[in-house]
Image (cartoon, rainbow, N blue to C red):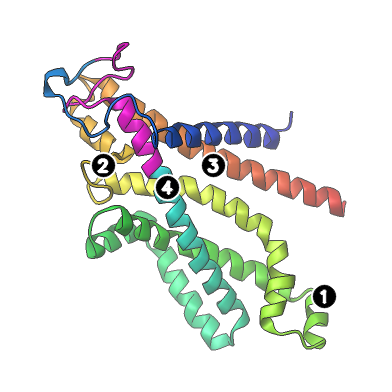
Amino acid sequence: MKRHSISFILGTVITVVAIIFSAVSLVFTPYDPESMDIYNRFQGPSAEHLLGTDHFGRDILSRIMSGSLVALSSALLSVTIGALLGIVIGLVSALSPKYVSSILQRIIDALMAFPTILIALMLVTIAGKGILPSALAVALAIVPVFSRLVYTMILETKEKLYIKAAVSYGAGRFRIAAFHLFPPMFSRLVTQFTSSIGRAILLESSLSFLGLGIQPPSSSLGMMLSEARSYVLTYPYQAIPAGTTLLLIVLGFNLLGDGLSEVIDGGRRIRHG
């Protein structure tokens, strides 16, 4: 079996399992993720609490299920907003006069020059803590990726003969973009979107770990890791489940994105080979 097939299959399996695991929390969790029981805190894994309880006596499995749902939904919202903004900016930049394109690309360059986590930290500090501010902060960090991708692909495609033919026949910019520029880009945008979800989950977890993302009593994988770090030597089961879950979800989306890219490129080589 080829490497890209393994990446695609493994990524799909991990991603689907993570989505199902998270979605189940909408209708069922073993315990209330926010319910505290100080008389049963620091309980180890058992038949009653499969992954144990935390320092407030909350069921770790229930909180991981709820936190995974928050991570996935927040990442999906962030990447959707960032992708839409990035695509629009890249499209306008590629099809506008040179001075407009230059201004937009310098803004994108400035965003790309800053570390992603620093941009997110700055925006969250300004906008405040919570799910929506952290989602917008992550979205802003995603914008340059899609903007530069669309801008580059349009510049490459604009020089093709069928685009020049469409222009010579009087086709407008919107028609050219909708029917001639976007279809060839769609597969690469889907691949980038999938890969960016893993990145967004990691960013959101980083913000929550620092206390700037999801706020208590809501569950968050990053916040669970932050709370467990004080007990990592004495009660390691506090941090291991949340860290492993975060690792697997991010790995799943990264493998899926890599697999999609390889599958799409392989199909393109077959068609043109």
**Whether residue 72 is visible:** yes
Q: Residues within 10 Å of mark 3 (few under 14, many from 20)?
A: many
Residue topped by disc 1: 162
Task: Answer above or below: position of 11 versus 102.
Answer: above
At a point 55% along the width and 53% down the height, the residue shown is: 193
Residue topped by disc 3: 254
At a point 16% along the width and 18% down the height, the residue shown is: 40
Place residue 237 in its image quadrant: top left
Asked whether the beta carbons under mark 3 and mark 2 sit within 8 Å of each other, the answer is: no
Distance between mark 3 and mark 4 Cα atoms: 17 Å
Residue topped by disc 2: 218
107 within the magenta span = no
Looking at the picture, which amino acid does disc 4 mark?
Answer: Ser
At a point 23% along the width and 55% down the height, the residue shown is: 129
Outermost residue toward the top? 47
Give whichever of discs 2 and 1 has the lower sequence position: 1
Residues in magenta?
44-70
Outermost residue toward the front? 27
Task: Answer above or below: position of 216 versus 85.
Answer: above
Distance between mark 2 and mark 4 Cα atoms: 13 Å
Looking at the picture, which amino acid does disc 3 mark?
Answer: Asn
Residue topped by disc 4: 73
Give whichever of discs 3 and 4 has the lower sequence position: 4
On screen, residue 12 versus residue 235, left or right, reads: right
Asked whether the beta carbons under mark 3 and mark 4 sit within 8 Å of each other, the answer is: no
Q: Residues within 10 Å of mark 1 (few under 14, many from 20)?
A: few
Nearer-the-camera pick, 112 or 215: 215
